[in-house]
Amino acid sequence: MLDIKFVRENPDAIDTAMANRQTSWDRERFFELDDARRSVITEVEELQATRNAESKKIGVLMREGKRDEAEAAKEAVREVNEKIDGLASRRSDLEAQLTDFMAHLPNLPYEATPVGVDETENPERRRWGTPRDFAAEGFEAKPHWDLGTDLGILDFERGAKLSGGRFTVLSGDGATLDRALESFFLNTHLAAGFREFIPPVVVNREIMYGTGQLPKFEDDAYHVGDDQFLIPTAEVVLTNLHAGEVLDAADLPLWYTAGTPCFREEAGSAGRDTRGIIRQHQFTKVEMVKFATPETSDDELESMVAEAEHILQLLELPYRVISLCTGDLGFSARQTYDIEVWLPSYNAYKEISSCSNCGDFQARRANIKYRDPERFKGTRYVHTLNGSGLPTGRTMAAIMENYQNPDGSITIPEVLRPYMGGRERIEPRA
């Protein structure tokens, strides 16, 4: 959530930021609500001053024996209290409307975020690795959905039978590979200094609100139980571990990680990546989350991207890093790097990790602050960061396609072999 004082004092900057994001905001409505709320607060304060003055007079009049005047003063106090009570209801209504208005405003792009209209204007920062030339090797590469079906490790028909479209059953070496990837990702993060969690995957509404999934993206979320939700990413739970808390600057930065199942309705993605396991309603993902001071969050973002890149380098998968422009930026992010892995089936790079610095946007929503008595009085909001490190499904698809052999087998990347019982290949079924 944005700082309401900043919005009030810098409406032109908000106009520019929203235009750069290819969206708009109702400037007139904001000031209508904000001015009305502030007017009510001022009126209440004036009435409270009047009440206090009348209350003081009552005691003096009673001591002086002026009972009639004292009763009149008491009646004036009662009338003032009734007005204050009425204004309290009006203030609550205005604050609820203003809070809802602010909850729908996206984060402001950071100065380092390139200005652009959409994903076609995302600048590339760097590349690593060289895609295989399958034609030079004398065979035609297959997409992972065909490889997985032929190998008997991806079962799309049974997934659809059990749950509907965009659900897949992983079996045999497919299930083992998925589990191996999750363990490999987590162990790599732990070696880098992250702390591992196993959090709940069902959360309350306020937890989804805290990281910006609600109210804007409620249609993309899976509802369960009594106004609860299945998490779309472990970012939700890891960030909200400290909701309503005040952290110590000496403990920052905090580096957290968790591997969880994730659930997304993907209401707005009809027709996109419908084949294979690139875009599923249920998938496993290892997430990285950081809490940092404003002075260090830029560096923490760079190191988070480097951590995700490190995993892809260990797997020897070609990738590129791009900066998301303002028109492609996520709701809660102020700056984002996407890492895109090479997928032969698309003959293109496809997103496999998105690492974002949210500044104090999520911290304001979840009320996460920190104290640093040596530098300032009171408390300030932390900066939160999150990034994929990595999703197992998309990584599996990339491995299958980039490590496939002419006979339909899949070479297991060397770093994964200890997690696969020392095996070197996933072989076709006899």
Image (tube, rainbow, N blue to C red):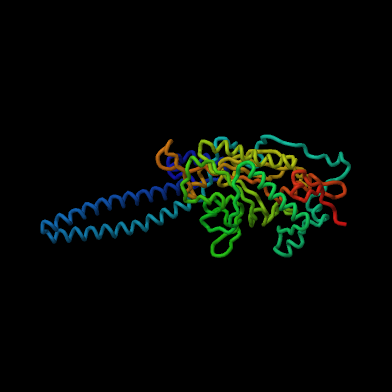
The one nearer the camera, 19 or 268, is: 268
Query: Is 184 on the left or on the right of 230, as rendered?
Result: right
The one nearer the camera, 403 or 14, is: 403
State whether residue 198 is above or below residue 139: below
| Quadrant housing residue 303 | top right
Is residue 251 something one can see in this rendering? yes
Residue at (68% x, 54% y) in the render: 283
Residue at (28% x, 50% y) in the render: 46
The one nearer the camera, 181 or 233, is: 181
| Quadrant housing residue 344 | top right
The one nearer the camera, 262 or 265, is: 262
Looking at this view, name the residue that lies furthest to the left. Answer: 65
Q: Classify the position of the C terminus by image quarter.
A: bottom right
How far from the left and from the top, in percent, is residue 252?
A: 52, 41
How far from the left and from the top, in percent, is residue 144?
A: 78, 50
Residue at (30% x, 50% y) in the render: 45
How far from the left and from the top, in percent, is residue 194?
A: 60, 44
State whether residue 384 is above or below residue 153: above
Number of residue marks: 0
Is residue 18 something one can see in this rendering? no
Query: Is 86 on the left or on the right of 326, as rendered?
Result: left
Query: Is 65 on the left or on the right of 231, as rendered?
Result: left
How far from the left and from the top, in percent, is residue 89?
A: 37, 58
